[in-house]
Image (cartoon, rainbow, N blue to C red):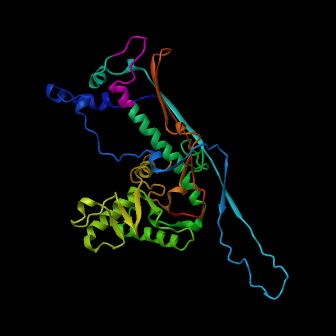
């Protein structure tokens, strides 16, 4: 495996004269609109010092109102009562994802090098790895590493036959094991990708309200610390519906935007709340579902594996475990004089954890 591109096959043939070649350089390149993936360490609670197989003890603070009974105040006999603690545990599963890419700079097409204002290397000495070309390539490599870390932590599934998913059970797999905490999103059962689409953003709203109401019945419910995390497939449909309603939008939906405080209602993905609980869009989930062979059903019109997903819990119950900070999204680049290649290497020693297995609601 190594670096490939379609520059020579698809782009270069379009340059046929001085006019078409005028802007054929890196500084003029436009980038297709894409949803930026968030740094996994910024969006999740990271726990370091974790070893695979490590058991995390959990004390369950179960109320015990049947203590201290009424007794006969005229009787000197002592009355015994019960006292107990209830413990549970979370067993950490973390696995290593890792790969490298070797690049022989001599193999690049001369026009490709010209595009990046680079020259062909023939010397066997040190090569500058901070050139525009290598930074361009390593940027994509690092982006892939970060998204793969999201994949491992959230979508890992030991029952999978794919090496990209089979290392550990991720957060979704752990949550799906407790059927009592699930709100079913029936659109996920559609036979085609089109059949899986929501008819209206109102359906998304209804699912999130159902999750809220299910959580509200449970003793851990505290709206001041909860947050929704949803796929973009859900949030965009919801926001579109809310904006179409305008002033008629449900009063429990809000969008904080100080610049529009005195203007008309405009709902956006950022700052969206339902019943005061933030609704956070996780673009990374959509990217993993739509571009992983394991989950996209082959792409195109084919049905995805649960393309709509939502979690309602608090941040401290969605943990990303790793051995040390440096072991999460670790990256290195170097030039090897042995084979005259530049190597990119990346790895993450990572696993997802839901320690309190009944203190969340999963929409799936």
Residue located 43% across and 44% down the image: 39
- List the single residue furthest toward the right: 77
Q: Position of residue 171 (x, y in %)?
A: 55, 53
Residue located 25% across and 38% down the image: 30
Q: How many marks?
A: 0
Q: Main secondary structure of the magenta part?
A: loop
Q: Is residue 254 above or below residue 283?
A: below
* Region in magenta: 120-137
Q: Is residue 118 above or below residue 362?
A: above
Q: Is residue 70 magenta?
A: no
Q: Is residue 298 left or right of residue 161?
A: left
Towards the viewer: 28 or 86:
86
Q: Is residue 3 above or below residue 278?
A: above
Towards the viewer: 297 or 317:
317
Q: Position of residue 237 (x, y in %)?
A: 34, 62
Q: Is residue 130 magenta?
A: yes
Residue located 46% across and 41% down the image: 146
Q: Position of residue 15 (x, y in %)?
A: 21, 28
- List the single residue furthest toward the left: 19
Q: Is residue 171 left or right of residue 7?
A: right
Q: Position of residue 115 (x, y in %)?
A: 27, 25
Towards the viewer: 189 or 78:
78
Residue located 48% across and 14% down the image: 337
Q: Is residue 64 above or below residue 261?
A: below
> Is residue 111 among the parts visible in the rendering?
yes
> Is residue 293 among the parts visible in the rendering?
no
The answer to which image quadrant residue 229 occupies is bottom left
Q: Is residue 289 left or right of residue 218?
A: left
């Amino acid at each position: 495996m190594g670096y490939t591109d379609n520059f020579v096959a698809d782009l270069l043939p379009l340059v046929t004269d001085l006019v078409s070649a005028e802007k054929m350089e890196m500084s003029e390149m436009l980038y297709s609109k894409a949803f930026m993936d968030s740094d996994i360490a910024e969006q999740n609670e990271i726990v370091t010092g974790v070893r695979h197989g490590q058991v995390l003890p959990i004390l369950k603070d179960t109320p015990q109102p049947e203590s201290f009974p009424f007794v006969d105040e005229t009787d000197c006999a002592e009355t015994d009562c019960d006292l107990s603690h209830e413990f549970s545990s979370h067993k950490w599963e973390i696995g290593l994802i890792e790969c490298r890419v070797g690049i022989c700079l001599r193999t690049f097409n001369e026009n490709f090098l010209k595009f990046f204002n680079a020259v062909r290397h023939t010397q066997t000495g040190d090569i500058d790895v901070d050139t525009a070309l290598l930074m361009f390539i390593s940027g994509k490599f690092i982006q892939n590493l970060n998204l793969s870390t999201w994949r491992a932590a959230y979508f890992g599934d030991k029952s999978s036959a794919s090496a990209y998913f089979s290392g550990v059970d991720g957060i979704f797999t752990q949550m799906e094991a407790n059927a009592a905490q699930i709100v079913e999103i029936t659109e996920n059962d559609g036979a085609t990708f089109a059949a899986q689409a929501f008819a209206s953003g109102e359906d998304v709203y209804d699912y999130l309200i159902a999750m809220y109401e299910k959580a509200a019945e449970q003793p851990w419910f505290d709206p001041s610390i909860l947050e929704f995390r949803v796929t973009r497939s859900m949030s965009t449909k919801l926001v579109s519906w809310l904006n179409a309603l305008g002033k008629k939008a449900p009063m429990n939906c809000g969008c904080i935007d100080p610049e529009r405080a005195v203007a008309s209602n405009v709902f956006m993905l950022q700052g969206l709340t339902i019943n005061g609980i933030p609704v956070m869009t996780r673009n990374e989930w959509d990217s993993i579902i739509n571009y992983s062979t394991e989950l996209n059903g082959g792409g195109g019109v084919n049905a995805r594996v649960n393309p709509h997903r939502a979690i309602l819990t608090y941040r401290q119950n969605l943990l990303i475990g790793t051995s040390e900070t440096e072991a999460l999204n670790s990256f290195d680049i170097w030039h090897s004089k042995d084979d005259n290649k530049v190597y990119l290497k990346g790895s993450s020693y990572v696993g997802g954890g839901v320690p309190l297995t009944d203190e969340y609601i999963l929409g799936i």
